[in-house]
Image: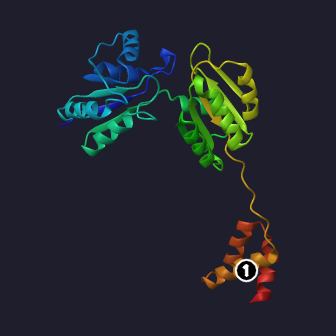
């Protein structure tokens, strides 16, 4: 019987954020797969956890993934961790999860920190619908192409960004998305945690004078909703007639068109009757 792959979310800064269940899972796993063994060793030493570590990262995931899978199929349990946050989210762990799924190995998530969700929660921007975009490309052309595709996105957008790329990214966002609200969340859960709520133009001006430091999560407001063009009563009647031809009753057709267009239901009904 195969073992289980546990996706253990690790702290993004404050070690106190590792959950008791996360600690227990790391203690009980047969081995731990980690992005950087040096980073994970600091966490494990803090909690006095002594387990065999194997390296699993962007550059060895094909071979390392097969080796981990073989051990799981042999019945061992593995805890997968990343340097910070939730494994498999914008992370090579997604390949290992897919590999396990294809081979019938159980995968369980041990929830915890996620920088994108933390930043979204403190941003002050709409949180009901959002899109996570991860890191934009370091290549200027690819970055600008990605932002151009997102220009009409109405959901709140969440990006990761490194300090050395922050200035060009903000400049491209201002040019291609237009000036809109943004929250710059820096060093979340760490000693120098900071959230700056401003606009893209304000952020560009701020970091023209201020040196970016630490890891950032950028939460950018979605594009403003475009109001549908106002329809004339005659156009509304034409829509009612089209629905009538499809078999709808007059009452139902009028109600639907009125709801979709904002036209007066009574006026629409009387005008449509005259055209019958």
Looking at the rendering, in which quadrant would you find the N terminus?
top left
Residue at 68% across / 71% down in the picture? 256
> In the orientation shown, which residue stands out farthest toward the bottom?
276
The residue at the point 59 percent across, 27 percent down is 165
Residue 160 x %, y %: 56, 31
Residue 244 figure quarter = bottom right
Circle 1 residue: 238
Q: Residue 117: image x %, image y %?
A: 56, 33
For the C terminus, the image quarter is bottom right
Q: Identify whether 225 is placed above or below 165.
A: below
Q: Position of residue 177 (x, y in %)?
A: 69, 43
The way the protein has been coloured in the rendering is rainbow
Q: Quadrant of residue 203?
A: top right
On screen, residue 163 above or below 172: above
> Local crowd at mark 1 within 10 Å, few (<14), some, or many (≥20)?
some
- Between 182 and 76, the residue placed more toward the observer is 182
Q: Is residue 39 positioned above or below 33 on the image?
A: above
Q: Nearer the viewer, residue 248 or 214?
A: 214
Left-right relation of 257 to 35? right
Q: Is residue 130 visible?
A: no
Secondary structure type for disc 1? helix
Q: Quadrant of residue 162?
A: top right
Residue 66, horizontal then vertical, whole percent: 24, 35
Direction from residue 136 to residue 71 in the image, left or right: left
Identity of the residue drawn at 37% across and 24% down: 35
Please state if 236 lies on the left or on the right of 186 as rendered.
Answer: right
């Amino acid at each position: 019987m195969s073992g289980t792959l546990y996706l253990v979310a690790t702290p993004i800064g404050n070690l106190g954020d590792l959950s008791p269940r996360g600690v227990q899972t790391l203690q009980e796993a047969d081995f731990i797969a980690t992005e950087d063994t040096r980073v994970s060793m600091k966490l494990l030493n803090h909690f006095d956890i002594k387990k065999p570590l194997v390296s699993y990262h962007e550059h060895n995931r094909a071979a390392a993934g097969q080796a981990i899978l073989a051990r799981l199929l042999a019945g061992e349990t593995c805890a997968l961790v990343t340097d910070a946050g939730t494994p498999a989210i914008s992370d090579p762990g997604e390949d290992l999860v897919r590999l396990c799924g294809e081979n019938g190995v159980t995968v369980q998530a041990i929830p915890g920190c996620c920088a994108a969700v933390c930043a979204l929660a403190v941003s002050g921007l709409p949180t009901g619908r959002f899109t996570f975009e991860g890191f934009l490309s370091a290549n200027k052309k690819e970055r600008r192409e990605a932002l151009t595709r997102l220009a009409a996105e109405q959901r709140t957008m969440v990006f990761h960004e490194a300090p050395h790329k922050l200035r060009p990214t903000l400049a491209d966002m201002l040019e291609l998305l237009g000036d809109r609200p943004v929250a710059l969340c820096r060093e979340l859960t760490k000693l120098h945690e900071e959230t700056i709520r401003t606009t893209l133009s304000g952020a560009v001006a701020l970091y023209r004078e201020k040196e970016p430091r630490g890891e950032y999560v950028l939460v950018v407001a979605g594009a403003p909703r475009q109001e549908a063009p106002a329809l004339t009563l005659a156009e509304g009647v034409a829509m009612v007639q089209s629905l009538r031809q499809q078999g709808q009753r007059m009452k139902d057709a009028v109600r639907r068109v009125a709801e979709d267009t904002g036209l007066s239901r009574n006026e629409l009904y009387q005008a449509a009757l005259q055209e019958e």
